[in-house]
Image (cartoon, coloured by chain):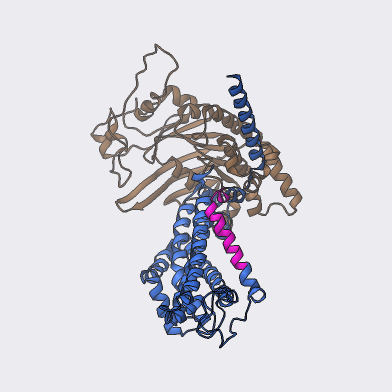
Chain colours: A blue, B brown
Amino acid sequence: MTASSKTMDQKMAAAEAKRKKRMKKKPTTMAGETWHRFKKNKLAYIGMWYLIAMVVIAILAPVIAPYGMDDQNADAILLTPNADHWFGTDNFGRDILSRILYGSRISLMVGFATVVFSMTIGVVLGALAAYYQKLDNVMMRIVDIIGGIPQMLLAMAIAASLGSGLRNMMIAVIISTIPQYARITRSSVLTIKESEYVEAAKSIGASDGHIIFQHILPNVMSPIIVQSTLGVANAIMASATLSFMGLGIQPPSPEWGAMLAAGRVYLRDYPHMCIIPGVALLLISYALNVLGDGFRDAFDPRLKN
Amino acid sequence: MSALLEARHLKKYFSTAKGTLHAVDDVTFSLDAGKTLGVVGESGCGKSTLGRVLIHLLKPTGGQIFFEGEDITNLKKAELKKNRVNMQMIFQDPFSSINPRMTISSIIGEPLRVHKIYKSKEDYRHAVEELMDTVGLAKRLENVYPHELDGGRRQRVGIARALALNPKFIVCDEPVSALDVSIQAQVLNLMQDLQEARGLSYMFITHDLSVVRHISDEICVMYLGTVVEKAEAKTLFTSHRHPYTHALLSAIPQPKVKKDTQRIILKGELTSPINPGPGCRFAPRCIHATKECFERAPELQEVEPNHFLACHHPE
């Protein structure tokens, strides 16, 4: 009895100490608390580190790649993975590992750059539409028209009409993803706009710009951040798809989608040519998706603990 | 002495799918400096709309607003901004009326920043500290975020923000209804102290009759967008004459066990404020209503000095 109560006391003391420690460490800013909640989601945390690793790899690709991205070796054609070529070689004897490493530069750059552009344009359009009711109808109808066309189909149509190449592919992906950001921003802004703190800001005579940038946008950022994290995955997949179909980056470039397309011919005998870029795409898009989900949960104050 | 604030035949209509909603219909009153006008009425009677029209959050459909004798109904943008310094608002919900992503000091200092009152950062910081001190917020709360504060403290933040520009008139839209009773008293006392110290005029919107009695000099009873009775607080509580006021006041619980209160229960529901008929708004629920009441709306008339009434059959 006494022994058990003693351990109880110890346990309680330990719990108390732990609680105090947590209280002490507990961050007080909004961002700090969000980060605190985010870290609890292990999968999202791993996804974040995978993404950071990929970014580092992309930056250091010329340093860490064992071969050049276009180095052809006629003596080492269509090799399966081995000690010299970890991921094997393709039909021109090019080292697939090196091509994947270089390819990550294209995929990440396309993913992030397109999202930055489409998010900026979409957020501005959505915020303006929601804030100025007169613009709303016109702007959202245009967005509806763009959004009504399946995203991939639209991207294909734009890429096909502009011609292939990195720049045109990015334009295609940007235009086709703007509606998502515009919609999400508009709906969030509509809610925040009616809030009493916006009314309070109006009553002190704040300008529209002040209200939009100081009060509305900071409070709608969380859904936009979530959407753009998922959007990077989406953009990477879209650009890989366009390249796969020959509408994006053209073959000599080590783009993952283009590599998949090149390997398709050899799928029966040398499946590694398709599997490896496919897995690379899968992993990056999965990492971004769990990261986006983690952000969404972390931003939701109802899950606060 | 001329009134600080005066409203003449103020109207605010909203157009809805079903018709025109008469939220505020022909409201006339005046308020002297340093006084408090209580506005009572049930939910949806246009109390808050009236407050928002007065401080230009909503544009009136008709009528005029005078501030210190000047017509401020239709001001240009720049003039309006200048005028906002004079009139501020304290909001009902201390949880939704302050931006959750700003620190306490930046919320309180926002009006000062918007109007560029202080040139130097040092002066600005000093002013914010002084405001926090005025409303009884500890200096250590300067950099915390609103979610770390309780309702009472948050409402103090809202009050400090309203005071920042040193206004003469403050619309208080049910400032204590979201707070605990114990904290209500603290906040009300703070507001009264501030009124004395700074000579503020309040328009105190509430449906809490005990609160309004405590704080008001004059009380105005609203029913469906119209003022039905307006008198000094004491007069209104003792010798009210409008049947609606009577019913409203009979709903105040009495702290006596054996006192037999004659509570008047109003029959029927609040009639729709959309496209109201020509008669008295209260007629469908009034016990004294006659044919006349349904045909012609009574006008607000001074029945005794400083006691206004709009009823064909006063009690």
Residue B129 lies left or right of residue B228; in this view the side is right
User: Residue A103's spot in the image, x, y percent?
Assistant: 56, 76
Is the C terminus of chain B in the top left, top right, bottom left or bottom right quadrant? top left
Q: Using the image as rendered, state which of residue B94 and residue A26 is in the foreground.
A: A26
Is residue A214 visible from the viewing direction of this image? yes
Q: Residue at x 46, y 30 (%)?
A: B208
Q: Which residues are magenta?
A: A37-55
Q: Residue at x 56, y 78 (%)?
A: A99
Q: Residue at x 63, y 50 (%)?
A: B110
Q: Residue at x 52, y 37 (%)?
A: B175
Residue B121 lies left or right of residue B246; in this view the side is right
Q: Using the image as rendered, state which of residue A161 and residue A166 is in the foreground.
A: A166
- Label count reads 0
Q: Does residue A39 belong to the magenta stretch?
A: yes
Residue at the farthest left position: B291
The image quarter in which residue B45 lies: top left
Q: Using the image as rendered, state which of residue B142 and residue B110 is in the foreground.
A: B142
User: Residue A220's spot in the image, x, y percent?
Assistant: 51, 56
Residue B314 lies left or right of residue B27; in this view the side is left
Assign the magenta stretch its main secondary structure: helix
User: Residue A256's spot in the image, x, y percent?
Assistant: 51, 75
User: Does A263 sit above or below residue B265?
Assistant: below
Is the N terminus of chain B in the top left, top right, bottom left or bottom right quadrant? top right
Is residue B75 visible from the viewing direction of this image? no
Residue A83 lies left or right of residue B23; in this view the side is right
Q: Does residue A266 belong to the magenta stretch?
A: no
The image quarter in which residue A6 lies: top right
User: Does B299 sit above or below residue A184?
Assistant: above
